[in-house]
Amino acid sequence: MQTKVVKFGSVEIDSAKIKEAARLIDAGGLVVFPTETVYGIGCRVEASSLTKLNKLKGRAVGKYYTLHIGQKSDIAKYLPTVGLRTEKLIRNGWPGPLTIVFELDSRDIDSQRGKLDREVFENLYKDNSIGIRCPDNAVAAALLQAASSAVVAPSANITGRPPATNGGEVLAQFSGQIDLLLDAGPCKYKKSSTVVKIGKEGLEILRQGVYSLPELEAMSQVKFLLVCTGNTCRSAMAEGIFRKYLAEKLQCKVDRLEEKGYKVFSAGIMDMTGMPASPEAVATCAAKGIDIKNHKSTALSRQLVEESDFIFAMAGVHRERVVSLSGEAAGKCILLAGEVEIADPIGQPQEVYNSCAELIEKAVKKRIGGLVI
């Protein structure tokens, strides 16, 4: 076999050549293409093609390869349910030098078994998990979108040898053994993607690569912000109550929420910082087993708004202030209790605080009940 080489410049991608490469993959051929990390060997997910790939790489039968997708929206074909933290990691990490191993529950696995071709299902899912990568490379993205088959693309190297990071290194190992090489010059990072497993227990690095664990934890942390006026009554209580029920949903202790990838905080639209929660708010929460004695008020800022993924306001005036700080927040800021505004209990008797907390608790339970974790 003579390996055909197609070279790409940095400006334009020849769509006819991309389609030719996609047809080769769909027909069972092996096409090597660039990513931002290393070159990969594109192969359709089908038994005879995978056997050929294993033989080329000198890899043992039974090894599972990572699915490659051309755009992150393609994830829906392979992952029916996406939790909040997973969604954020995808949003921040793809396209990019990141391979994610997703854990699926039995219901989602059954759904995929019924939806996908048998060979595709059996060769992609292992132990109720699947590894997926969405490369940040124009040639790779175009090829993966053009292919009608599900495509895996392990690094272009014989097992035990370094992955190829340019066309010359590909040919040094595979000339005459692959159908086509799409040569777009040297890869950006010249090192493998980070492989991370994400599930209910959090993140686990399976292979070191471009991203570190702290970077991935920051990229995937989900942040909830509760907003009222002074941040000493309503939002202070709401923060404590939200923490309690979120921890219950995650089946962890409150002090492990950030370890699990979730942060809950509160702020007030008044320029008031460092004030404790009101004694009545502290007493109301204490009666519910929630400790907010160490709470200190925080003034709402544009930075807080932009960093938050979900913002729950106690009243319309608070939402208006949030949106005024950042117009993009309009889509993520809503009233905590739906159409009902939660009135300020400040200066009122303890019973008013108790009633306010009951309304907050009811709203928080509803909000958290609707979250996919």
Image: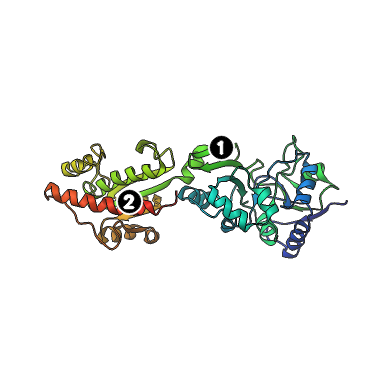
Residue 29 in which image quadrant: bottom right
Answer whether residue 140 is visible to the viewer in this image.
yes
Residue drawn 43% across and 37% down? 259
List x then y, in percent, for residue 49. Answer: 77, 51
Q: Amino acid at mark 2?
A: Lys
Looking at the image, the residue that sits furthest to the right is: 1
Q: In the figure, 12 relative to 262: above or below?
A: below
How many discs appear?
Answer: 2
* Disc 1 target residue: 205
* SS for dot 2: helix
- Quote the CA–CA distance across marks 2 and 1: 33 Å
* Disc 2 target residue: 365
Q: Is residue 370 left or right of residue 100?
A: left
The dot on residue 51 is: none
List x then y, in percent, for residue 178. Answer: 81, 49
Q: Is residue 297 left or right of residue 122?
A: left
Q: Amino acid at mark 1?
A: Ile
Q: In the figure, 300 relative to 214: above or below?
A: below
Give the class, few, some or many, for how many residues have Cα within 10 Å of label 1's Cα (few <14, many ≥20). Answer: some
